[in-house]
Image (cartoon, rainbow, N blue to C red):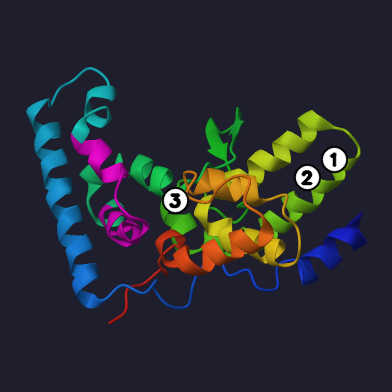
Amino acid sequence: MVVVLTVALLSGCVHCNAIPKQRASLSPDQESTVQADFERKYRAWREHCDSIFGASHARPYIECHQFESLKKMPVSVLTYMIDKLENDEKAFPLRLAVESIARIRFRRQYDRQTKTYTYPDYPDLKQGESIWLYWWKKGRTRTPRIFELAHVEWKRLTREGKKEQAQEQYARMRGLGLAALPCMIAKVEGGDASLIPLMSELTDGELRQDADIVTCVKWWNANRDKWTLPPTQQKD
């Protein structure tokens, strides 16, 4: 099994790049518009939060149309949301918007001894470190490796008829979110159509679940900028 996984890691994700070297092709004017739109919607949400200050639970702060409008913003807004999370202590709930836009679902386990959550896919995450900031700056570079391990196991368990365990590995791939799309399209380009339904799920059905390989690759080439995560830093 070790040999199989090693070979897969070396060969299966050659063209997979979870963090692009360049931002998706937005003009400076487009980027400025996204940033301005985000700042406007963020202020509207903060004004709503201030108006209900003292609410006994968190739901009124995030179950509102102001927060929903943030969650519906394009992928390119993640750069500005992460900046808020890092520099504005009142922005903490934005982590939910980041998860929604990036389609990420972190695997976590509760440690009863330390009474904290650990994240098995990110063993170098330090205790007390923000998982969202860690993932954005460093953790997503592990996406190709995590994806390949989960993909190999998913295929094996499916062949062996172990549906429940296979579903766990499918969920692991799903939880990597948009960062794993380049890994998935690399598999599809190699002739594996089994990941097309997952790509469809991650892209809200814009790619049809029943698309064939040719259609899938053509769709990706036409729409990759919309679904590609921004790099960790903005261009000067």
**Residue 202 position within the rendered picture, expressed as x and y whole percent measured from the top left:** 52, 47
- Residue displayed at 30% across by 58% down: 77
**Residue 56 position within the rendered picture, expressed as x and y whole percent measured from the top left:** 22, 17
Q: Nearer the viewer, residue 85 or 225?
A: 225
Question: What is the secondary structure assignment of the residue under circle 3?
Answer: helix
- Residue displayed at 85% across by 67% down: 7
Question: What is the secondary structure assignment of the residue under circle 2?
Answer: helix
**Residue 154 position within the rendered picture, expressed as x and y whole percent measured from the top left:** 78, 45
Q: Amino acid at mark 1?
A: Leu
Q: Is residue 135 left or right of residue 83?
A: right
* Residue placed under numbered mark 2 in the picture: 154
Question: What secondary structure is the magenta-colored segment mainly?
Answer: helix
- Residue displayed at 44% across by 62% down: 229
User: Does 205 sit above or below residue 74?
Assistant: above
* Distance of label 2 from label 1 (alpha carbons): 5 Å
Q: Amino acid at mark 3?
A: Ala
Local packing at callout 2 (Cα closer than 10 Å; few below 14, some 14-19, many 20+) is many
Span of residues in magenta: 66-84
Location of residue 157 by image quarter: top right
**Residue 199 position within the rendered picture, expressed as x and y whole percent measured from the top left:** 58, 50
* Distance of label 3 from label 1 (alpha carbons): 27 Å
Location of residue 65 by image quarter: top left
The mark nearer the N terminus, 3 or 1, is 3
Is the C-beta separation of discs 3 and 2 under 8 Å? no
User: Does 43 sit above or below residue 117?
Assistant: below
* Residue placed under numbered mark 1 in the picture: 157
Residue 108 among magenta residues: no
Residue 67 among magenta residues: yes
Is the C-beta separation of discs 2 and 1 under 8 Å? yes
* Distance of label 3 from label 2 (alpha carbons): 22 Å
Location of the C terminus by quadrant is bottom left
